[in-house]
Image (cartoon, rainbow, N blue to C red):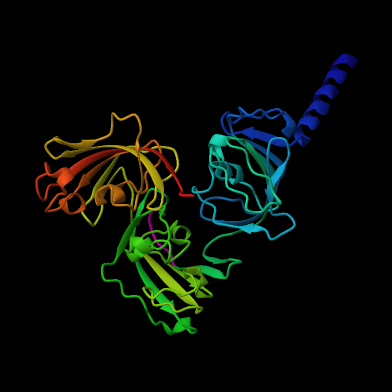
Amino acid sequence: MQQNESALRYKLILVAILMILPARVSSAQGATQPTRSPSSLEAEIASIDIEDLRIGLGDEIGCGCWPTIHYKGMLPDGQVFYETYGGAPFEFFYSELLMEGWVQGLAGLRVGGKRRVTIPSQFGYRSTPPSQKNSTFIQIPLNSPVIFEFECLGAKFLPVVKLSNKMEIQRLREGQGEPAGYGDWITFQVKVFSGEDLQAGHNTYHPENGPFQIALPTPWGIFTGNTARMQANLPYLDMLLYGLKAGERREVVFKDSRFLGPMGDPLLGVKANEPFAIEFECVEVLRGPTTTLKNGLTIQDINIGTGRYAHLNAIVFIRYKGTLQDGTVIESNWEDPDPLKTRLYRTNIIAGMRIGIQGMRVGGVRMLYVPANLAFGETPPDKYSHVPPNSPVVYQVELVDTMLPR
């Protein structure tokens, strides 16, 4: 009897010890892992490792919200390469465009919570760590795993979001259907209001070719249709369109035009240093596997892919094979040892490819059925003199990799 009581007492003590230990979860195995000190971390870490240091009780971080956090970034030996503690906290839009280690490491963290996330290089900075302009912090070695400690101070959600950068987002009307996410094509209308009295309703922007149709994710200002000025028009376009449903209307108020640069933006009708507002109305959300755009391009996903998303401002590495509709090969690098590297907005590939690759994920393969006006047109260049005039073409494209320009 005493032996049974001793065994029971031992089990209860063991359970109590296990309950107070911080939770550690591996993204690869999805199981509890033994606690390890940072000094014992190997360079060959293969999975994102999450340890909750304190469980929060507030709202949890998820796609489409604006968290406010403090964080500290460290190397495996404990050296700090960046932190916000001692300064202003970091407010940002949480989405799949963040570093993969942040996407997984922050998901589900609640307001008031704190966690430590160990990120292997393939889910972190890989071979291109950021340059440290501030000499206070050390440089991150190439291909090094990193450790982040996150503390969630708050999280903001629609229908009304007031951000610390003097931008306000408000849902004016609910929509219906599936919300727009990355990889989807969204069709929308735009109105721009500027001046001191935004309530006057002066619409300063008169699009001639609306509604607009773009793939998410998208860089700044693509809805203007002027890709040469894509970095000079409207920032934050991704987070303003993300999650829109058909029929939904959103208004975004910018307290001053510094979001557009020091001169404002004549194309939008916004003068320097004046407040302005933009109203978005979603017409429809298109989602694959087969999508036909209003310009006649048909996109068919053969394999979705699981890596990072391509957008118009990205550097992409692609394999492709272009044919006429009867199967005659126009061009191909499918058998080449190295994929083609290009910026999507450049003109060394046809417009149908520049448009059709947007929204792809690394590892994805898609077919692009391209009308003649988005291919080689009425007069193909000399390099493509074997292509008959006004020929629709078909391209098979594999997205091998993508990265942002440095």
Hey, which quadrant is residue 44 in on the image? top right
| Up-down relation of residue 402 to residue 92 (above or below) | above
- Residue at (40, 58) in percent of width and height: 245
Question: Where residue 170 sits: x, y (%)?
Answer: 50, 68
Asked if residue 290 can be seen in this view, the reply is yes
260 displayed left or right of 390: right
- Residue at (80, 31) in percent of width and height: 17
Question: Where residue 54 sits: x, y (%)?
Answer: 73, 45
Question: Where residue 343 sits: x, y (%)?
Answer: 37, 49
Count of numbered labels shown in the rendering: 0
Q: Residue furthest left?
A: 388
Hey, which quadrant is residue 28 in on the image? top right
Inspect the magenta stretch and tell me whether residue 269 lies in it. Answer: no
Tell me where the magenta segment starts and ends, as one range. 173-178
| Up-down relation of residue 84 to residue 398 (above or below) | below
Between 191 and 334, which is closer to the camera in this rendering?
334
| Up-down relation of residue 303 to residue 114 (above or below) | above
Between 3 and 35, which is closer to the camera in this rendering?
35
380 displayed left or right of 185: left
Between 327 and 266, which is closer to the camera in this rendering?
266
Hey, which quadrant is residue 91 in on the image? bottom right
386 displayed left or right of 161: left
Question: Where residue 88 sits: x, y (%)?
Answer: 69, 61
142 displayed left or right of 360: right
